Image (cartoon, grey):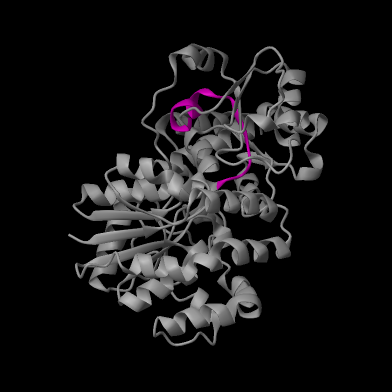
Amino acid sequence: MAHIIMLTIGSGGDLYPFFRMGSVLQQHGHRVTLVTHCIYEQEAMKRGFAFMPFDTTAQYQLMMNADIQVQVQNPASGIDFTRKYLLPRMEDNARRIAELYDGAETLLIGHYMIHVLAQMIAERLRIPYVTVFLAPSFLEGAQTSSTMTRYFGEVINGIRQRFELAPVRNWERLMEDYSHGVAFWPHWFGDTAERERITKAGFLLHENEEEIPAAYRSQIVEERPVLITHATTPPISPAFFQASIEACETLGLPAIVVTRHVDVVPQRLPAGILHVDRLPFSKIMPSVRLLIHHGGIGTLGQALQAGIPQLILGNGFDRPRNAGYVSGLGAGGYLPISRWNKDDVSAAIQQLLDQPQVQEACQVASCRMRDSDPDKLVVDIVARALEGTPIRSGELQYGEPQQTTGSLHETIELLQGLTPEHRRQLMAKLVARKAKA
């Protein structure tokens, strides 16, 4: 079988899909090497992956500090992040990753955030390359290309020249140059337009093997608390946790705050509100009544799968756009940073919990997710990439059919996603409505 080299950087949400991908591909006999931040070496080794660090501990901390700056969506900070963190080690990392190639059948799978680096390596080794898109906002290569041309084109072309590769004249074309692309969200989420060479596989969610600690298990199951989390990253403002905690206290709702960044959590918490460093989200999500989070694609996918409402306090990156997609499904709400206060968060929570249509939308989304099989799709895409066979958009879709225009098709698609019990409930409502008419 093939040697699969996976390349990714970022927060936990950028790593977990690669962990799951690697495990699935290992189960099908492939040899997997993960190239990412040094702090994830133990996680990789635990899964049986070979590992190459993308950075040192000091360099990783530099990235995390820059990460916070980028959240304010200041274009200058994004340029600074690339200049300080990515460019200084791009050539060295490219050479080190290229040295992993041992002549065996090899496939590179890379996060689109570092597409320029991954594409360069694939060109140099003449091996197939699968581009991974983790959120709809990453499908904006043309926008990225203008930045590349203006600020970094000369430096990157210098590296390409030393790799004996032709210089890039059209950055827009390079950013859209992928023969095999996989998007880890379902076709009914976000921009539903199909794109050539990109297959929407569905959410590839992190399935934590840990169990809920016994100390919290009964409390979670019996009280059905609100879950408040910013996942693996700290928020841009302490108001994220402060406003969420105060809102839950005002409404008399029990809550669990999950974050390892203790400095952004109030030292004294109200009665009924608990702080823990970590919990297995895939295990606790079905038992919480509402999720308040930052808008990361993995976290919102967990909530959609569990069928619970979510309030997204999103700022920076893809988060506000992800929140808009969740709101469009009717399964949650969104507050920008200017509204991270007790009153606005309280009102948003109350609205989400009081509206039956929100609960219904959450259940519909949960049913639709059960029909997808992203693991099988990943295996098939890898097989096609190794064969050198181009994949047309939507060709390997599993589960639900591709969305077409027309309200009738959309209605049928929604009905097909309902469980028998939900269909009976819907029928009872329709009969009652007809009787009133």
- Residue 389: x and y in percent read 28, 73
Would you place residue 70 above or below residue 42 in this image?
A: below
Would you place residue 7 above or below residue 21 in this image?
A: below
Give the left or right position of residue 277, taking residue 186 as reference.
right
Residue 372 can be seen in this image: no
Give the left or right position of residue 298, taking residue 44 as reference.
right
Instruction: Please tell me in which quadrant of the rendered image residue 233 appears.
Output: top right
Q: Residue at x 61, y 63 (%)?
A: 84
Instruction: Please tell me in which quadrant of the rendered image residue 353 appears.
Output: top right
- Residue 89: x and y in percent read 50, 65
Q: Residue at x 66, y 64 (%)?
A: 80
Q: Quadrant of the N terminus?
A: bottom left
Residue stretch in magenta: 281-296
Front-most of residues 413 and 397: 397
Q: Residue at x 54, y 87 (%)?
A: 169
Quick check: is 435 in the magenta stretch? no
- Residue 331: x and y in percent read 60, 39
Front-most of residues 323 and 35: 35
